[in-house]
């Protein structure tokens, strides 16, 4: 019986992978043959991909390197259809059947690409301790579905490039709304199911996002800065003969002052293998005090009271031996039980799986290595990487452990994306490729030998946006290097 069950799982995985490959090819509306073979070469190349030219040398890519760049620069991907296809695939769920989504921004750094438009200053970390840098590049907002337990797998669902001067919170709200609506339309969430949990880091304003998405079946869990100040609910109104305006906010809850915390509503203590004793304390119905400035400047009417649960997570030790600072979380739900508190902080730890996703894309799948000039070409390459990663996820039940002699054996259900990719070439041989064979062509004449490029590319400033929302363009009469060199005259 176990062999028959295993055979059924393999047949089901083969059918899902074959169906996805066919529907993915249909999403490539222009130069689809070259783009599809490019994704196959990305999956079948041995070892990490260093450059796009290396992909053109793979047997799966039957076209030249010129066709590769032409497909990225002039091809077309039906992104809306591909997003719907990703939302319809089987997604990982928690033990209670809940979907857990994570959203984060990862930069495609292009510090030396002066001719690439729409670059922004991306927040990155240097090699030193607490060293923060702002480097020009293209930031991408990625939404993935998280798995339970320790794993490096995640199911990507959407990717949006952030333009200069964009409101990250507004774009994230629109992105999450689209993803959740597609999941509901695909039957991934039905009435009566647990609400979808969205986990995010401290770079997002979780209360604002929860307020803007209050009409959707989701909960928001975000990390808060340790210097935040929350307010309690308004105390019961007491009649005062002198009158006066009733208070709108209660007493302060200062994260950095323990004497303002008061009595907890729930406390849990969990023994963990890596962190020792983990203590989570929760306070119910706390909200930030909003003012009519920044994101709430154009808000019509009275500012809302966005109540939620504040959770303080403190661990006994860190695996790295660093300082075990407490982590503050804000959950959009109220009346949290002990089970809700444990589920929240454990789900937040699973948020870091998206970092493994980014590292695999950048170090193995060559996501940010191509030196593309057009941001539209970067978007096409990003979606090819997402489609390639999705094929690896669907091929997990079919993969075998092709380990190196110095590597330890791994169980089939514990294979990493890199190990699944090692045997994808053997799996691809069993699938018919929908891409048509290339037509014989002659190489173009190219630029005559010894001639210079007389049409220089336009230079673009980084992250400069006018008050009208349009990107800043350097005046035509202003040229770089026209300022005379300062000279020193001897008296």
Image (spheres, rainbow, N blue to C red):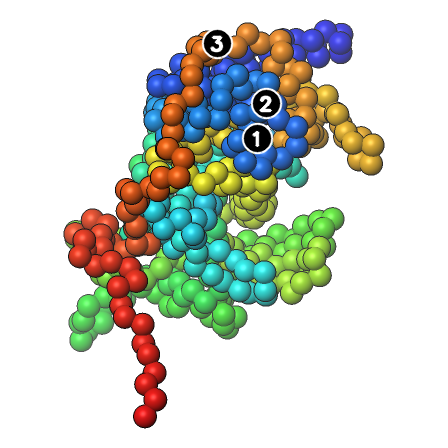
Label 3 to label 1: alpha-carbon separation: 20 Å
Q: Quadrant of the N terminus?
A: top right
Q: Which image quarter holds the C terminus?
A: bottom left
**Labels 2 and 1 touching (C-beta < 8 A):** yes
Of marks 3 and 1, which one's residue comes earlier in the chain?
Answer: 1
Disc 3 vs disc 1: Cβ atoms closer than 8 Å?
Answer: no
Numbered circle sitting on residue 437: 3
Q: Is residue 173 visible?
A: no
Picture quadrant of residue 12? top right
Neighbor class of circle 3 (other Cα within 10 Å; few <14, some 14-19, many 20+) is: few
Give the label on residue 54, or none: 1
Q: Residue at horizontal 22%, vertical 52%?
A: 473
Task: Measuring from the top left, give residue 30's x and y in whole percent.
Answer: 35, 19
Using a 10 Å C-alpha cutoff, classify the residue at mark 2 as few (fewer than 14 neighbours), some (14 to 19) or many (20 or more): some
Q: Residue furthest front?
A: 450
Question: Residue at (64%, 20%) from the top-left corner?
Answer: 424
């Amino acid at each position: 019986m176990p062999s028959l069950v295993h055979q059924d799982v393999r047949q089901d995985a083969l059918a899902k992978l074959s169906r996805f490959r066919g529907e993915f090819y249909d999403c490539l509306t222009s130069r689809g043959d070259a783009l599809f073979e490019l994704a196959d070469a990305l999956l079948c190349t041995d070892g990490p991909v260093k450059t796009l030219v290396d992909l053109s040398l793979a047997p799966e890519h039957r076209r030249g390197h010129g066709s590769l760049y032409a497909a990225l620069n002039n091809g077309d991907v039906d992104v809306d259809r591909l997003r719907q296809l990703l939302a319809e695939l089987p997604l990982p769920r928690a033990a209670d059947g809940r979907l857990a989504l994570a959203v984060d921004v990862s930069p495609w750094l292009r510090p030396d690409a002066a001719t690439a438009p729409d670059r922004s200053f991306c927040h990155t970390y240097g090699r030193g301790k607490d060293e923060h840098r702002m480097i020009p590049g293209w930031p991408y907002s990625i939404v993935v579905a998280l798995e339970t337990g320790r794993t490096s797998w995640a199911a990507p669902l959407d990717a949006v490039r952030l333009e200069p001067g964009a409101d990250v919170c507004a774009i994230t709200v629109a992105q999450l709304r689209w993803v959740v609506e597609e999941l509901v339309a695909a039957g991934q969430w039905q009435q009566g199911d647990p609400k979808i949990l969205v986990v995010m880091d401290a770079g997002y304003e979780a209360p604002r996002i929860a307020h803007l998405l209050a009409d959707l079946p989701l909960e928001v869990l975000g990390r808060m800065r340790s210097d935040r100040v929350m307010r309690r609910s308004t105390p019961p109104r007491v009649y005062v003969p002198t009158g006066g305006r009733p208070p709108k906010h209660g007493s302060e809850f200062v994260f950095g002052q323990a004497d303002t915390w008061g009595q907890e509503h729930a406390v849990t203590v969990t023994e963990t293998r890596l962190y020792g004793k983990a203590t989570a304390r929760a306070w119910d119905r706390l909200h930030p005090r909003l003012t009519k400035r920044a994101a709430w400047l154009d808000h019509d009417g009275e500012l809302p009271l966005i109540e939620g649960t504040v959770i303080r997570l403190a661990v006994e030790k860190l695996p790295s031996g660093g300082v075990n600072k407490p982590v503050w979380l804000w959950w959009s739900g109220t009346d949290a039980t002990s089970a809700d508190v444990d589920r929240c902080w454990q789900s937040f730890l699973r948020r870091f799986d998206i970092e493994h996703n980014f590292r695999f894309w950048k170090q193995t799948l060559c996501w940010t290595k191509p030196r593309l000039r057009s941001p539209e070409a970067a978007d096409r390459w990003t979606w090819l990487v997402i489609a390639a990663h999705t094929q690896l996820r669907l091929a997990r039940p079919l993969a075998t452990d092709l380990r190196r002699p110095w590597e330890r054996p791994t169980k089939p259900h514990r294979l990493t994306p890199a190990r699944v990719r090692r045997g994808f070439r053997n799996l691809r041989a069993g699938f018919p490729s929908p891409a048509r064979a290339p037509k014989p062509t002659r190489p173009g004449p190219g630029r005559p030998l010894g001639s210079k490029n007389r049409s220089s590319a336009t230079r673009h400033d980084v992250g400069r946006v006018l008050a009208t929302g349009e990107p800043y363009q350097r005046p035509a009469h202003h040229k770089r290097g026209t300022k005379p060199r300062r000279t020193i005259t001897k008296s």
